[in-house]
DNA sequence: AATTTTCCATAGTGATCGATACGAAACCTG
DNA sequence: CAGGTTTCGTATCGATCACTATGGAAAATT
């Protein structure tokens, strides 16, 4: 997973994986069928172990502003963990790919779009309970938040520290519209 | 240039370049020495022809807010031009690379860092003339703006339209601090 | 203990990578 | 029109890619 995260799908060779896992080629193919299946297993593991912060943030019983804050600050931390490749595997894994690996690139694009959709859903919920103004486009803002996270992923890859990413996250939060009036307030 | 932009440095094969340029392999190597030099030529051409908006925006004799607005709206347009690969070559060219192509990845990282530095320089100039508050960190905000542009590049690659990118740009601009008092005003 | 069976690492498969050696065609000179 | 030179495309180079067939060692059974 770390190799795919660091070098991307295509640039990670079987020889690198073999050495890192301490397995012989037949062992790898017995266990994972082929390289593409192995990569998908790595994606699933990444989803489970590295970016739980996102689901946690979006499903936490807190006001919408706080949920988005948790999301962005969680990303700042997850994208700059010591000992891990910087950024997000969903971005680094295959942003540009050869025609043969188009299916992999599309799969990662699907993950990114799912993230954006999850943000939009959380914003829509916030709008429904009055955390956000009526005339507010949740889709547009979700695209902004998802885009900022993608940008943080690249900044992390370029060496940005956790603190620098946190500052970027807090700056991005300033674009949120002022908190709406709660119905009961 | 379009092939490198679309598929990245490593995933673009000589066979693809040969077909696209209508040249034989020796012609390519006579003209460009090797693949790496050809890529650097493509980078230079990209810098000259596709992203002049950035230098224009940062050097325009307008208030700082307007300069940053021009920068982000210019990116929205440049990253979604019809007939061109989406996003920015400096991001798509080699975000993740094999160990053999580390030099290329580092070069692109250098371009990204130079962009961020140029933004910081423009913000510092704005702070000097009172467009921005005193206690404002130009480095942090430059990292935010550069990060947003990188994020726009990925959103564009995922199919975001020019209008969607413009909305993202305007949303990002809302994070700018309120315009400071001009000295003479 | 002898024999069979199972398993697994080594060695190699065809394909493709970036890059180039060689033969043919074209061209300028005498 | 002949000779010498230069240019240029084909065919191929060694290396590496993802992937697999095969030989030999270990294990299991009689």
Image: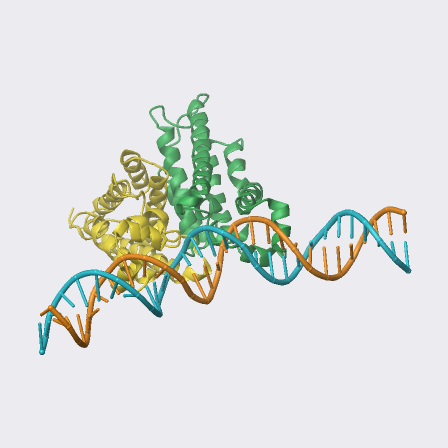
Chain colours: A green, B yellow, C cyan, D orange
Question: Percent position (x, y) of residue A113?
Answer: 43, 35
Left or right for A110, reference B45 = right
Nearer to me, D17 or D5 = D5
Give the residue displayed 27% in from the left and 56% down from the top: B42
Left or right for B81, reference C3 = left
Question: Percent position (x, y) of residue D19?
Answer: 55, 48
Q: Quadrant of the C terminus of chain A?
A: top left
Nearer to me, A181 or B148 = B148
Nearer to me, A131 or A46 = A46
Left or right for A176, reference A76 = left
Q: Residue A130's quadrant in the figure?
A: top left
Q: Residue D10's quadrant in the figure?
A: bottom left
Left or right for C24, reference A15 = left
Question: Percent position (x, y) of residue A58?
Answer: 50, 34
Residue B73 seen: yes
Residue A80 seen: no
From this viewpoint, which residue is outermost toward the top? A184
Counting every numbered tag in the picture gives 0
Q: On screen, B74 above or below D15?
A: above
Question: Percent position (x, y) of residue A140?
Answer: 35, 32
């Amino acid at each position: 997973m770390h190799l795919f995260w660091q070098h991307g799908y295509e640039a990670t060779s079987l020889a690198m994986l073999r050495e890192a896992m301490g397995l012989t080629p037949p062992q790898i193919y017995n266990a994972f069928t082929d390289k593409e299946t192995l990569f998908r297993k790595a994606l699933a593991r990444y989803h489970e172990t590295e970016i739980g912060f996102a689901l946690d943030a979006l499903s936490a019983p807190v006001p919408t502003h706080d949920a988005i804050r948790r999301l962005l600050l969680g990303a700042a931390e997850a994208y700059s963990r010591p000992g891990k490749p910087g950024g997000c595997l969903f971005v680094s894994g295959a942003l540009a790919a050869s025609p043969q690996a188009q299916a992999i690139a599309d799969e990662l694009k699907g993950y990114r779009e799912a993230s954006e959709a999850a943000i939009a859903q959380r914003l829509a919920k916030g709008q429904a309970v009055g955390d956000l103004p009526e005339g507010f486009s949740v889709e547009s803002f979700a695209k902004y938040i998802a885009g900022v996270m993608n940008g943080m992923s690249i900044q992390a890859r370029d060496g940005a520290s956790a603190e620098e990413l946190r500052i970027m996250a807090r700056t991005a939060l300033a674009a949120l519209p002022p908190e709406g009036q709660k119905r009961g307030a």
